Amino acid sequence: MTTQVKQSSDNGHTELKLTKKDFESDQEVRWCPGCGDYSILAQTQRTLPDLGIPHEKFVFVSGIGCSSRFPYYMNTYGFHTIHGRAPAIATGIKVTNPDLSVWVITGDGDALSIGGNHFIHLMRRNLDINLILFNNRIYGLTKGQYSPTSEFGKVTKSSPFGSVDHPFNPASVAIGAGASFVARTMDRDPAHLQAMLKAAVKHKGTSFVEVFQNCNIFNDGVWFKYTEKNSRPEHVVYLEHDKPLIFGAEHDKGIRLDGFTPEIVSLANGEYSSSDLLVHDETLQDATYAFILSHMMDNPDLPAPVGIFRSIKKMCYETALMDQVKAGKEKFGENPDLQALLEAGDTWEVQ
């Protein structure tokens, strides 16, 4: 039973408008109390009704991990698939039914460890799919081992003397793989999270959204420097298209480039003004600028960029594929002779 409410349209007809409740399944949500996943689920369910897409047109696909329970909690179609392979399943869904709104829900371990190759190939192919990566810098489902995004020296159950792996930067990986839309947001900033989800859906192509997500059981507070209201202004710079990079509790700090190196400058003493700062442009075809922004996370003295790093136009994989299918039908007909097709190229007999 849905909770759709009636709304008058411009043409005088009565239409049905979806609500958050229409996207809530009858399954009990079973994450640890206080987990950041609850916020991501709630903001997704609040965002989807505003998109004007019937809930039967959505498909949520997940791999393995705490985040991968997500499809059970959405009143949409969904697949809980295998470890790291959600992008492959999602690709098949989108290619066979391009009209569907396909979402991949994954975690830092699922996407960037066993699923690393599937992740980068989804980015480069540019199917019209939305991938939301829950990044808590830990393996939560298997009880607290270090993950591909865990910081160097991280002490966990699987690295008792500290991890000696250098961590992946998810945004950098996505940009390096050619992603046409890359964004970052936080579980503790609901309004911004909703805005990034809406932007991801509007983008035609693969949309990658990294979410700083807290695991309060096995990695509590790993992002609090960036996500808490009292510390966020000094450690986060919000990316807004065509606006200078300004941050700080008093909006008195900015980011400028010294060559290819971002640096903080003060706007308080008059030495620098907003005209001296880096002005954000998410539409640059060259990925160099977006790559520089993504690597600001690697310098603890710089604020973490949050928002849309890159949003460019690029042909979608399924569009090019359907064009090939159409061309093939025009050349060989709707029902070609399969045997003739098999023998149309180089053939040989084995004696």
Image (cartoon, grey):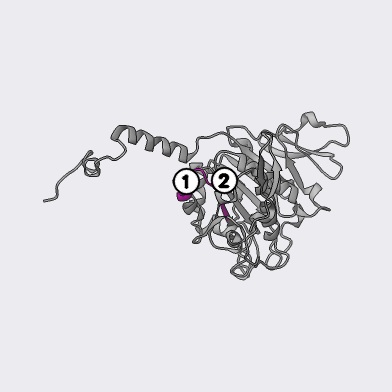
What residue is pinned by disc 1? 97
Residue range of the region highlighted in magenta in the rendering? 91-105
Residue 295 visible? The answer is no
What residue is pinned by disc 2? 174
Q: Residue at x 75, y 43 (%)?
A: 237
Instruction: Report crowding for label 1: few under 14, some 14 to 19, many 20 or more residues within 10 A (C-alpha).
Output: few
Q: Position of residue 217 (x, y in %)?
A: 69, 68
Query: Looking at this view, is 2 or 253 the one in front?
Result: 2
Q: Position of residue 200 (x, y in %)?
A: 62, 43
Q: Residue at x 82, y 32 (%)?
A: 272
Left or right for 55, reference 335: right
> Looking at numbered disc 2 in the image, what kind of residue is underneath it?
Ala
Instruction: Kindly state the secondary structure of the residue where label 2 is placed.
Output: helix
Q: Residue at x 58, y 36 (%)?
A: 287
Query: Looking at this view, is 239 or 4 the one in front?
Result: 4
First reached walking from the N terminus: tag 1 or tag 2: 1
Instruction: Kindly state the secondary structure of the residue where label 1 is placed.
Output: loop
Q: Which mark is residue 194?
A: none
Q: Position of residue 131 (x, y in %)?
A: 58, 49
In the displayed orientation, state which residue is furthest to the right.
Answer: 269
Q: Is residue 104 magenta?
A: yes
Picture quadrant of residue 279: top right
Picture quadrant of residue 145: bottom right
Instruction: Report crowding for label 2: few under 14, some 14 to 19, many 20 or more residues within 10 A (C-alpha).
Output: many
Residues at marks 1 and 2 touching, judged by CB atoms closer than 8 Å: no
**What is the quadrant of the N terminus in the image?**
bottom right
Residue 171 visible? The answer is yes
